[in-house]
């Protein structure tokens, strides 16, 4: 069980002994609160967290769409937090010490092949409420390129069934759905969600088995479970589905400016990372398969 006292004592230490500014203190507080919530939802004792748990937290932040600098700052806060716990004798080592920050600059892009995407989406094959929901979630992630936060924050009103699009509140953008994605989402509403929801006032589009808005942790577990069922060996994550969406669109001739709008990027340089990735794939393929290479 996570104790809020650890964080409070750490923040008091930063003020009394380090003399940090108010803004810096707020940044530490926000980062540690986020970490505590993640650890709590994972059912882990904060004093028993290991390097794998910290690495998982790092990946969670990346999947949530955080910038490299933001993720690095959060990891720095967690390292400082565990240094304090180590100093006070609450832990015997700092599990965050061995977790490295990602380098700024080149965007790390890991993708699934089209065959792997198809295999993943076909895993929830039953007609029960959970399978119907999970098929719709997996298809929608690949159909729209939404990140974790955007997907779980969707509300019923954000799905326009008649015009076949999803409205994403982040930067107010509209993403069209291809027929199969629309069909699975409509099926979920008809054959799954209405049986899962207990409160008729619930606005969330995707709900868990308790009828409440799905959490980030819950979405992660769904994707990891079906990746295992499909025998996919890659370290799959929601971020990988977003990367696959963008990469496959570019490989099939999509316009980079249109892709920028769909993904909700503020800067075209962020989208160009996918362009460069596709170009590198083509270059690698030429070298690998050309008979005179």
Image (cartoon, rainbow, N blue to C red):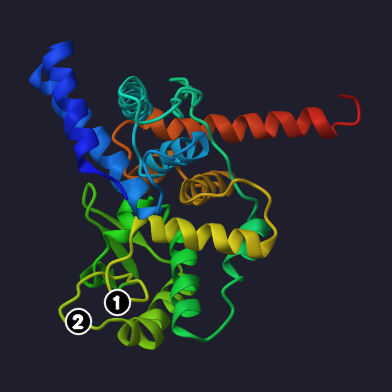
Residue 211 tag number: 1
| Element type at mark 1 | loop
Q: Nearer the viewer, residue 13 or 121?
A: 13
Vertically, is 106 above or below 235? above
Picture layout, residue 175 above or below residue 276: below
Relative to residue 246, is residue 86 drawn left or right?
Answer: left
Q: Position of residue 80 (x, y in %)?
A: 32, 22
Q: Nearer the viewer, residue 281 or 122?
A: 122
Q: Residue at x 20, y 72 (%)?
A: 203
SS at badge 2 = loop
Query: Can you give x and y, in whole percent of width and height, for residue 89 in the image?
Result: 35, 25
Which quadrant would residue 211 be assigned to in this image? bottom left
Of marks 1 and 2, which one's residue comes earlier in the chain? Answer: 2
Q: Is residue 9 found left or right of 238 in the rendered image?
A: left
* Vertical order, 138 against 238 (above or below): below
Mark identifier at residue 199: 2
Q: Residue at x 12, y 18 (%)?
A: 15
């Amino acid at each position: 069980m996570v104790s809020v006292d650890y964080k409070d004592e750490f923040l008091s230490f930063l003020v009394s002994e380090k003399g940090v500014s108010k803004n810096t203190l707020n940044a530490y507080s926000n980062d540690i609160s986020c970490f505590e919530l993640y650890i709590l939802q994972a059912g882990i004792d904060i004093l028993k967290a290991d390097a794998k748990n910290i690495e998982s937290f790092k990946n969670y932040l990346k999947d949530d769409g955080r910038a490299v600098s933001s993720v690095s700052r959060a990891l720095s806060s967690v390292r400082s937090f565990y240094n304090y716990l180590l100093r006070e004798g609450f832990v015997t080592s700092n599990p965050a010490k061995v977790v490295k920050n990602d380098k700024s600059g080149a965007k790390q892009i890991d993708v699934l092949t089209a065959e792997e995407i198809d295999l993943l989406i076909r895993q929830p094959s039953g007609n029960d409420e959970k399978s119907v929901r999970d098929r719709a979630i997996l298809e929608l992630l690949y159909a729209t390129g939404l990140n974790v936060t955007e997907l779980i924050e969707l509300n019923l009103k954000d799905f326009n069934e008649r015009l076949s699009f999803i409205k994403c509140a982040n930067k107010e953008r509209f993403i069209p759905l291809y027929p199969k994605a629309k069909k699975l989402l409509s099926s979920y509403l008809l054959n799954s969600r209405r049986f899962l929801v207990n409160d008729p006032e619930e606005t969330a589009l995707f709900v868990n088995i308790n009828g409440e808005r799905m959490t980030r942790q819950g979405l992660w577990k769904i994707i990891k479970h079906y990746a295992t069922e499909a025998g996919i060996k890659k370290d799959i994550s929601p971020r990988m589905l977003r990367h696959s969406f963008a990469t496959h669109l570019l490989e099939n001739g999509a316009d980079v400016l249109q892709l920028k709008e769909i993904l909700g990027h503020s800067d075209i340089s962020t989208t160009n990372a996918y362009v460069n990735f596709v170009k590198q794939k083509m270059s690698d393929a030429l070298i690998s398969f050309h008979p005179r290479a």
